[in-house]
Amino acid sequence: MVKLSVIVPFYNVQQYAPDTLKSLRANSREDFEFILVDDCSTDGTPDLLARAERALPGAVVVRHERNGGLATARNTGIDKARGEYLTFLDGDDWLAPGYFPQLLSVIEELGCDFVRTDHVQSTGRARSIHRVPHGRRWTVMNPREAILPADRSTSVDYAYAWAGIYHRRLVDRGILQFTHGLRTAEDRPWIWKLHREAESFAVVGLLGVYYRRGVASSLTQIGDVRQLDFIRAFDQVIDETAADPEADKLLPKAVRTYCAIMAHHLGQIERFEPAVARKLRSMSAAALKRMPQDVLAEVMDSMDAQRAARLRRVRRRSIGTRTVAA
């Protein structure tokens, strides 16, 4: 029986994949499987994965004929996974030796649906620890209780899929899968669904994932139209949260997070090509119009002045454009 399935998407990461694969070897066990998803790479990544399939115990390589993005690649891995537990790693990140056996022991001891962990961020030679924004550690809780308060960073804002481990029953209930085709912010609807629909979780101070920040090929570093998928992602968060029985409690948090991310992108609009920048403004204006207006008004009144001003400018420009057109 496979105890743990590790799902690792790769796309054009030949520079970093050797470190990733080496760290997986240092985490192998006879009852672990490693599902290596090649998302139609065009560099030397497929050759590295072909060698890994022969050398890494439990490795299975799955190749996409077309590039589908991170969410789709993870779903491919979930569909192939046979383990009682699942976890993720990205193809340009790496692990401390023996981390996965420790992580598995933790969730088996706690007996919950999923566990969230801290991680180490690597930017060049610099290292920094990033912790789950949740005070209670090693305590099994209802994840719904970790969504609020709306005005503070909480567990639902810590959206890294690879910072944790998940029981197969979440797959069987349709909770662990990602939204097909999302190119960025794919973790946001996913983490919200986990917190709304799973029954139990815990946060632990186990370090072992090294997240490589600032990779040139990462979508977080590329100012193209794919970055605008954050709007599709957060529209899904708002729609699904609005249908929740506790929508009146949870929507302010969802809207506030959406507005904060939107203001962030608008504040860095100069990194986008002109056509993409125009699209960002128009899509942001339309998104603000779709939000529950009473909640949006309260959120914008409570935001810091700079971010609120960015959002209000977009709204005014949209209203002005419609007035001229009329």
Image (cartoon, rainbow, N blue to C red):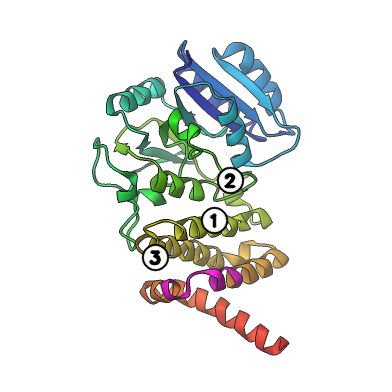
Q: Real-space Cα distance between discs 1 and 2?
A: 9 Å
Q: Which mark is residue 124?
A: none
The residue under the point 34% across, 62% down is 249
Q: Main secondary structure of the magenta part?
A: helix
Question: Compared with residue 313, is residue 177 higher up or lower down, i.e. above or below?
Answer: above
Q: Amino acid at mark 2?
A: Thr
Q: Which mark is residue 236?
A: 1
According to the image, label 3 marks what residue? 252
The residue under the point 25% across, 46% down is 135
Q: Secondary structure at mark 3?
A: helix
Tell me where residue 100 appears, x and y as whole percent. 41, 23
Image quadrant containing the C terminus: bottom right
According to the image, label 2 marks what residue? 179
Q: Secondary structure at mark 2?
A: loop
| Residue 186 left/right relative to 164 | right
| Residue 165 left/right relative to 288 | left
Q: Residue 79, located in which quarter of the rendered image?
A: top right
Q: Amino acid at mark 3?
A: Pro
**N-terminal-most mark, 1 or 2:** 2
Tell me where residue 106 appears, x and y as whole percent. 31, 26
